[in-house]
Amino acid sequence: MEKIKLKLIVIALAASLLTFLSQGSLAYYSTAGIAENVVTSGEIKLMIRETTDQGTAFPEEGVYIMPGDVVSKEVSIENICRHPFYLRVKIVYGIDSKELEAEDCFKLNINEKYWKESNGWYYYQGIVGVGEITPPVFSHVEIVGSKVDNSYIGKTLTLSVRAQGVQSENHPVKDNRYDLLTGWPKE
């Protein structure tokens, strides 16, 4: 009888051990988990600054002009985000809500030391760091007297500046060709 009891105890222990091990095994095969990864991309924010040569804000309502006038208007861009970026600027000329070619009315003194033209855009030759303000794209606008005749009387000439930025972190420039960078927003 003792042998039977011993066999039963061994079988019971083996069954208990098997049950215990199989529970861990079942748990291993039936466990599920969810992992959530959040990736946030940088946001580029910039501000176009328009001032006069005295450092005052350029009037929002514009200025009254005559043919041959030279108007003080300094246009710079400020980085107001937490990331450095590359920058390009497009200058759009117009008359009474229609686009013009620059030669039709305006002459700008582009700051070619820092700004290079390519395909109608002026590319800043460097990176605009956090909180930095670029050197002016231009500092004055000449109203071309030989082009602005009596047909312009009562018309509104406009000069609009559009700026676009592309994050510079992990985005190297090759051969100082900022115009060849990828990622510029569409117009």
Image (cartoon, grey):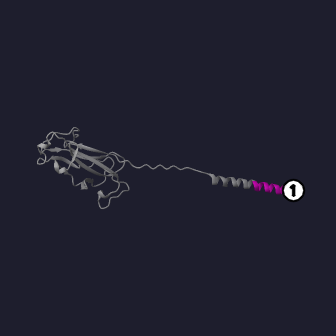
Question: Looking at the rendering, in which quadrant would you find the N terminus?
Answer: bottom right
Is most of the magenta stretch helix, strand or loop?
A: helix
Q: Position of residue 34 (x, y in %)?
A: 55, 49
> Which image quadrant for residue 172?
bottom left
Specify whether 41 is left or right of 32.
left
Q: Position of residue 4 (x, y in %)?
A: 85, 57
- Disc 1 target residue: 2
Q: Which residue is at 45% across, 50% downward?
A: 39
Q: Furthest-top residue in view?
A: 61
Specify whether 6 is left or right of 164.
right
Q: Furthest-right residue in view?
A: 1
Specify whether 11 is left or right of 77.
right
Q: Which residue is at 35% across, 46% downward?
A: 81
Q: Is residue 4 magenta?
A: yes
Nearest the eye: 31 or 92: 92
Q: Is residue 23 magenta?
A: no
Q: Which residue is at 83% across, 56% downward?
A: 6
> Which image quadrant for residue 15?
bottom right
Q: Position of residue 138 (x, y in %)?
A: 21, 49
Nearest the eye: 119 or 11: 119
Nearest the eye: 54 or 164: 164
Q: Secondary structure at mark 1?
A: helix
Looking at numbered disc 1 in the image, what kind of residue is underneath it?
A: Glu
Circle 1 Cα neighbour tier, 10 Å, few/some/many (<14 / 14–19 / ≥20): few
52 relative to 186, above or below: above
Q: Position of residue 73 (x, y in %)?
A: 20, 44
Residue range corresponding to the magenta coloring: 1-15
